[in-house]
Amino acid sequence: MILKEFRTFFSDELSAIYPQTEIDTFFFLLIEDKLNLQRIDTVLKPDFLISDEILSELKTIIVRLQKEEPIQYILGETEFYGLPFKVNENTLIPRPETEELVEWILKEVAELQSDKVRELKILDIGTGTGCIPISLAKILKNVTISAIDVSSEALKVAKQNAVLNKVEIQFIEKDILKTESLPQQFKIIISNPPYVRELEKIEIKNNVLENEPHLALFVDDDNPLIFYTKIADLAKNNLDKNGLLFFEINQYLGKETVEMLHQKGFKNIELKKDLFGNDRMIKTSL
């Protein structure tokens, strides 16, 4: 089969499940990964012959896509903040909203470092792929970064990603809900913990619900701020004076999260919307 025929076949096989824009995204990712071709090659090389072996592999991928398996898991990688990250079923797929959180942190760190603060110690809680600390470590100078996750399998992936991006992170396997204190003081603590309530499952797309780790996604309806409350308590004891606490949050619980932080004595609480206009991030200090 030649490239232009495969593109038509690919679209026909997936058109009942995905919009054409998403199908096109899948197609271009696959031809780059499996055929070493670029988007422009669909115009320049429409008669490129796909070998039977590769075609068989591509057809297997189509079946997986028909079952709504995320393309990132199929390829085993994704991009976050312009950097490559390995992903698998033990890690959440990094989201664009989290890139916005990284951007906000970088802006705040630039202001801190302009005040000639000594080396900054940063902690990421619930690190998953390691996308937040690794992105920060790739850009920032004079920082020491640690990252915690409860999942040993997620930490294996995070460690691979640190090597892939040539940065040093101290990874720690720890259940934060069972943690009474942190090992040291930090200037910045960050967390994008589980925050989707069980009642919100109806809003979750099938490809996420059926594939991504529920441990990293969901919390009980009756205590949706369990991670935020625990991390706020730890931060009260382990955050430097004038240190910063950053959260990615449930879009429906911005007011409740802000109120919880107020009650615990945090100040300068700033709630920020994401690119979709949803309450998504909080910055605060002691």
Image (spheres, helix red, strand yellow):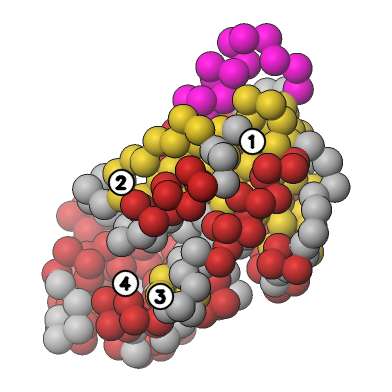
Reading the image, the residue beneath label 4 is 49
Mark before the other along the chain sequence, 4 or 3 = 4
- Magenta stretch, main secondary structure, is helix
Q: Eyeballing the image, is 246 above or below 251?
A: above
- The x and y percentages for residue 175 are 73, 68
- The x and y percentages for residue 92 are 51, 67
Which residue is found at the position 80% from the left and 53% from the top? Answer: 181
Residues 174 and 256: in front is 256
Residues 277 and 73: in front is 277
Crowdedness near tag 3: few (<14), some (14–19) or many (≥20) residues, C-alpha within 10 Å: some
- Mark 4 or 3, closer to the camera: 3
Which residue is found at the position 57% from the left and 77% from the top? Answer: 215
- Residue sticking out furthest to the right: 183
What segment carries the magenta color?
106-119
Q: Secondary structure under badge 2?
A: loop
Mark before the other along the chain sequence, 2 or 4 = 4
Reading the image, the residue beneath label 3 is 197
- The x and y percentages for residue 191 are 57, 51
Which residue is found at the position 70% from the left and 71% from the top? Answer: 151
Residues 96 and 117: in front is 117
Residue 267 counted in the magenta span: no
Q: Amino acid at mark 1?
A: Ile
Which residue is found at the position 47% from the left and 69% from the top? Answer: 224
Reading the image, the residue beneath label 2 is 274
| Gap in angstroms between the C-alphas marked 2 and 4 | 43 Å
- The x and y percentages for residue 16 are 14, 86
- Mark 1 or 4, closer to the camera: 1
Reading the image, the residue beneath label 1 is 188
